Image (spheres, helix red, strand yellow):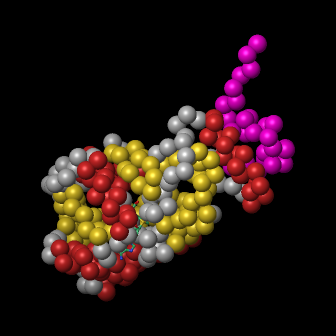
Amino acid sequence: MKKKKPTSLKQALKKKLNKKELSLVVTSYDMVGDIAIIEIPIELEKKEKIIAKTLLDLHKNINVVVKKAGVHKGVYRTQNMFILAGEDRKETVHRENNIEIKLDIEKVYFSVRLSTERKRIMEQVKKDEEVLVMFSGVSPYCLVIAKNTDAKRVYGVEINPAAHKYAEENVKLNKLDGKIKLYNGDVRMVVPRLRKKFDRVLMPLPKEGEGFLDVALKAVKEEGRIHFYDFEHEKDINLAKEKVKESCRKFKKKCRILRTVKCGQVGPREYRLCVDFKVIS
Ligand SMILES: C[S@@+](CC[C@H](N)C(=O)[O-])C[C@H]1O[C@@H](n2cnc3c(N)ncnc32)[C@H](O)[C@@H]1O
C-alpha cells in the first residue's frame, strides 16, 4: 500500500525531531505572497533549517521560508529577515482585498495581519472623498481604498524611499494611476505643502503617531474623519482616546470620538487600537 503523505508540519517532522523538540515547534506562520515567515524558539535554533525545509516541501504555495531576526526598528519600522529554506530572495507579490502588493519584506514595513483593518476603513469611505494616508508604506491602505471605493483621490506620504518606490510600482501594478498620488518625505514637511484639506486622514503609525496629531488636525476638513492608531496595554485602553482629546484641546479643535477598535494583539494583553473620530470645527 502507498504511504500517505504528511499533511501537517508536526506530522512531517515526527521522524526528524525528538518528542520534546516536537512539542516546541510553532506551527502558525505568516504568509506574505509566497514567503512564509516562521517563528523558531531558541531551543530549536539548531533544527531551524530542517523545520524550514520540511515546511517548504509540505506546501506548494511556499517558495521561501524565513525567520524574523529582531524586532521592528528605526523610523522606517523595518525588521531583519533570515532566509532558512527555498529561493534566495525577499521580494514577493502579496494579494489581499482585490489588490496586489509588491514588496521586499526586509526593506519595508508590511503586515498581512492588518488586511481586516484595511477593509474596515475602506468600508467607511464615501463617494468623492479625498483621503490622506500619512505613513503610507508600500501603500496598502491607498490601494485598498482606491480599488474598492468611489473615493475621488487618495494621497499617500511615506519617508522610506524603498517603500515609496514599491508604492509607485504598486499603483501601476493595480492600474490605479490617476486615483492615487504619492509623496516621498516627512509627513510634517510634506502635508502642509500640499495646501489641501481632506475628508479623511489615516495615521497608521501606532508607536509615535500622537506626535503628528497636529498635522492631521490641520489637514482635515470640518466634519472630516481621522483614524488614529496607538499601542496600549489592556488596562490603558482609554489612554488612546485621551491622547486624541488632549491634542484636540491643545490645537483648539472640536472633536467627537466615534469609536475605539481593537485591531490586533501585539503582545500579552497589549493591543493595536484605532480611534475613529470626527473633527467638527
Ligand atoms: C507602521 S508602518 C505602516 C506602513 C503602512 N501604512 C502599512 O500599513 O503597511 C509606518 C510607516 O511610516 C513611515 N514613517 C515614519 N515616520 C514618518 C514620517 N515622519 N513621515 C512619513 N512617513 C513616516 C515608516 O517608514 C513606515 O513605512
Where's the N terminus, which quadrant?
Answer: top right
Residue 13 falls left or right of residue 197: right
Residue 191 forms part of the magenta stretch: no
- Residue ranking furthest to the top: 1
Which residue is at the front of the view, 28 or 228?
28
The answer to whether any part of residue 137 appears in the image is no
Where's the C terminus, which quadrant?
Answer: bottom left
| Location of ligand 1 given as a quarter of the image | bottom left
Segment colored magenta: 1-26
Above or below 186: residue 106: above
The residue lying at 35 percent from left, 55 percent from top is 140
The residue lying at 34 percent from left, 78 percent from top is 212
Residue 235 falls left or right of residue 243: right
- Residue ranking furthest to the front: 88
The residue lying at 44 percent from left, 63 percent from top is 108
Above or below 198: residue 125: above
Q: Where does residue 184 sit, x and y in percent of width and height?
A: 29, 70
Above or below 21: residue 266: below
Q: Where does residue 65 sit, x and y in percent of width and height?
A: 59, 48
Q: Where does residue 151 sit, x and y in percent of width and height?
A: 19, 53
Q: Where does residue 268 sit, x and y in percent of width and height?
A: 63, 63
Residue 50 falls left or right of residue 267: right
Which residue is at the front of the view, 25 or 132?
25
Q: Which quadrant holds residue 275?
A: bottom left
The residue lying at 64 percent from left, 41 percent from top is 55
- Residue ranking furthest to the bottom: 250
Residue 24 forms part of the magenta stretch: yes
The answer to whether any part of residue 92 appears in the image is yes
- Total label count? 0
Which residue is at the front of the view, 209 or 61?
61
